[in-house]
Image: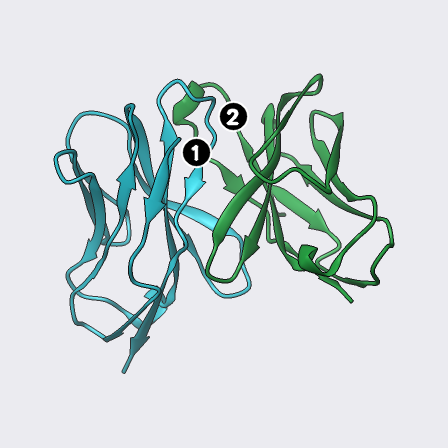
Amino acid sequence: AQSVTQLDSQVPVFEEAPVELRCNYSSSVSVYLFWYVQYPNQGLQLLLKYLSGSTLVESINGFEAEFNKSQTSFHLRKPSVHISDTAEYFCAVSRVGGGNKLTFGTGTQLKVEL
Amino acid sequence: DADVTQTPRNRITKTGKRIMLECSQTKGHDRMYWYRQDPGLGLRLIYYSFDVKDINKGEISDGYSVSRQAQAKFSLSLESAIPNQTALYFCATSDGGQGMRDTQYFGPGTRLTVL
């Protein structure tokens, strides 16, 4: 079975500061990795995903994540956050060959302050 | 119009009552899922369906049942609601075309309170 650990339940940061949201996973087989974002009172939206190829993946709104197989990590970063980035962020994995079932982490609440 | 809709958006019910949460999608996707979200626990898979005739249990199916009435509709039922089923429930869909690499698209959620 797979598991996902998001150690930080809340991350406060000032606007225009950099941020890193940490995600570590555990799996005995190959996985696909995802970051989803949940804005207040909304459902989840895919932010970015790693399937194969380049270990650095980017989203259209400036976030990036790097797959590190040796450290079993998929941390999410943004060099300069905006107030509108305030949301809850979920890391998720699915097992290659596992029927597209996602296992989610517990989420990290990013609060961007002025 | 939203691609994945859930009704009701909010529901308060009493212990022992039967309740149904409904999900509809206009994305034409074959695969549909039900999750529950609890504070500090993230999302957990309740049931999933890869087509109308295919229903599978997720990690926390006890106390729940589902019905896939059509490709576009997937309902979640609580036969006898209990307070620890108070949670935010999400429906999601995916295409199936890319196999296990599909993106899942989520509805807006149903907030259920069981008193």
Instruction: Note whether A40 is above or below B32 in the view shown.
Output: below
The green one among the chains is: B
Q: Secondary structure at mark 1?
A: loop
Of the chain colours in the picture, the one used for chain A is cyan
Relative side of B13 to A69, left or right: right
Q: Residue furthest bottom?
A: A114
What's the chain of the residue with tag 2?
B
Q: Are marks 2 and 1 in contact (CB under 8 Å)?
A: yes
> Residue A7 in the image: x percent, y percent?
29, 58
- In the picture of the structure, the residue carrying the numbered disc 1 is B103
The amino acid type, in three-letter code, at marker 1 is Thr
| Quadrant for the C terminus of chain B in the image | bottom right
- In the picture of the structure, the residue carrying the numbered disc 2 is B95
Task: Say which label, 2 or 1, has the lower sequence index.
Answer: 2
What's the chain of the residue with tag 1?
B
Residue at 23%, 25% (x, y): give it. Answer: A52
Q: Residue furthest right?
A: B17
Name the foreground residue: B94 vs A11.
Answer: A11
The amino acid type, in three-letter code, at marker 2 is Asp
